[in-house]
Image: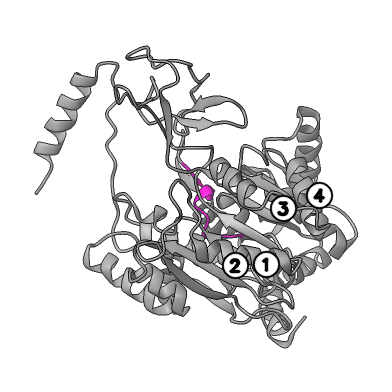
Amino acid sequence: LSAEQQAAAEDLVGLVTAHDFAPVLLNGVTGSGKTEVYFEAAAQALRQGQQTLVLLPEIALTEPFLRRFMDRFGHAPVAWHSDLRQSERRRAYRAIASGEALVTVGARSALYLPYRNLGLIIVDEAHETSFKQEDGVQYHARDAAVMRGHFEKIPVILATATPAIETRQQVAQGRYREVQLPGRYGAAQMPSIAAINLVQTPPDRGRWLAPPLVTAMTETLDRGEQALLFLNRRGFAPLTLCRHCGHRFQCPNCTAWVVEHRLTNRLQCHHCGHVEPPPRACPECATEDALVACGPGVERISDEVGLLFPNARRAVVTSDTLWSPAKAADFVARMEAGEIDIVIGTQLVTKGYHFPNLTLVGVVDADLGLQGGDLRAAERSFQQIMQVAGRAGRAVKPGHVYLQTHEPDAPVMRALISGDAESFYAAETESRRLANAPPFGRFAAIIVSSENLREAEAIARQIAESAPK
């Protein structure tokens, strides 16, 4: 461990030794070695004969984490996630309940297992939205972990490079402690970040990658290094329409646009999961061969990369392709062996991966996350792009990040390019405070459900009109 890491580890070990409730933010830049630091806290819990729970935001991260833990401690922890077979689930449950399993790694549901002697909870990538369950009983595993830590009277470590504003506010109010790792480990430096103004240097017609990014990719491949293109949009195209009559393909269940997936030859709704085969003719006007894919998804970007760099070995990384821990482990092994030159991926590639030879990151549409009326749109865009930028230059070779944007002067873009996270967070926090929005206030959702659309709309309108002004 470096001196910074050692000091941080000693702080965390002290909290485990104290045997008391202590929520703590482990705030370290990407590549700072947060995992190695909280491993020291887990080691202390092991020495005390207590159990440790590590929550991960994605199942795909489980296998790489298990391997890393095995390298550090010499034995594998128990895994808990939805991909387990029933027999594996039973064995894991018994081992956890009996206290035999000293370390458990899992998704958010692992938080509710009957630990015999729990001594530490770690929430890795604590800013991730996938820790929030939207279906059925709604809860945020980050907050539920803190609550369980309170009940158990044990420390809870929230590890992240981009803390949520809610977490930062808890620190500011003195409710959470904070341990910082401000620099990358060893000789690694933070990557340079630059904007590509798509108004001034647009891609060629029918393409999505601007010339400066293509040039940077060419230079990266010529040096024998790896590149990553990030676009948080699964499939080939987000919209399919008929160029003859203008019909747009919508989900029959929820009216969202269905997304074309050419790798699996299907149209899929990413909201409710509806799947249908792509028709040859338009269902509205019956015109054949008139269907047009509008906009890019990662599969379309992969096709463009194939045309630009026909000899490059590429991989598409999404929840559709890395749907199990084994698939994720295979991808990591191929990257580490140098069998992949260019990765084209969604938010799945922003989390926790460490590839020393990956030196270039291109964000295909940096404006994408800013669209819509989401309160947290700017914050999430900043977090997501900072995380994916953190995949570049994590070892000796320097990293470079290019943001393709139509708005290079937007506050998010300026903060990313300058690296001034504090000013960005301060402005976001103040705007929330003035609006009495979370974490300074609470929103309530009243959801009206009916088989009759007009009836639901009428009732919703009545509720809205009778709401206090």
Residue 414 placement (x, y as % from top left) = 39, 74
Left or right: 187 in relation to 131: right
The quarter of the picture where residue 154 lies is bottom right
Amino acid tagged 3:
Ala
Whole-number angstrom distance, CA of label 3 to CA of label 2:
14 Å
Q: Between 250 and 145, which is closer to the camera in this rendering?
A: 250
Residue drawn at (52%, 73%) of the image = 193
Q: Residues within 10 Å of mark 4 (few under 14, many from 20)?
A: many
Q: Earlier in the sequence, mark 3 or mark 2?
A: 2
Q: Earlier in the sequence, mark 2 or mark 4?
A: 4
Residue 233 placement (x, y as % from top left) = 49, 44
Amino acid tagged 2:
Ala
- Work out whether 216 lies above or below 328: below
Magenta region: 124-133
Q: Earlier in the sequence, mark 1 or mark 4?
A: 4
In this figure, which residue is indicated by the disc labeled 2? 216
Checking the image for residue 220, the label placed there is 1
Residue drawn at (51%, 55%) of the image = 209
Checking the image for residue 272, the label placed there is none
Look at the image and say whether residue 126 sits in the magenta stretch.
Answer: yes
Element marked by disc 2 = helix
In this figure, which residue is indicated by the disc labeled 4? 101
Element marked by disc 3 = loop
Look at the image and say whether residue 312 sits in the magenta stretch.
Answer: no
Amino acid tagged 4:
Ala
Discs 1, 3 touching: Cβ within 8 Å: no
In this figure, which residue is indicated by the disc labeled 3? 312
**Viewer-nearest of discs 1 and 4:** 1
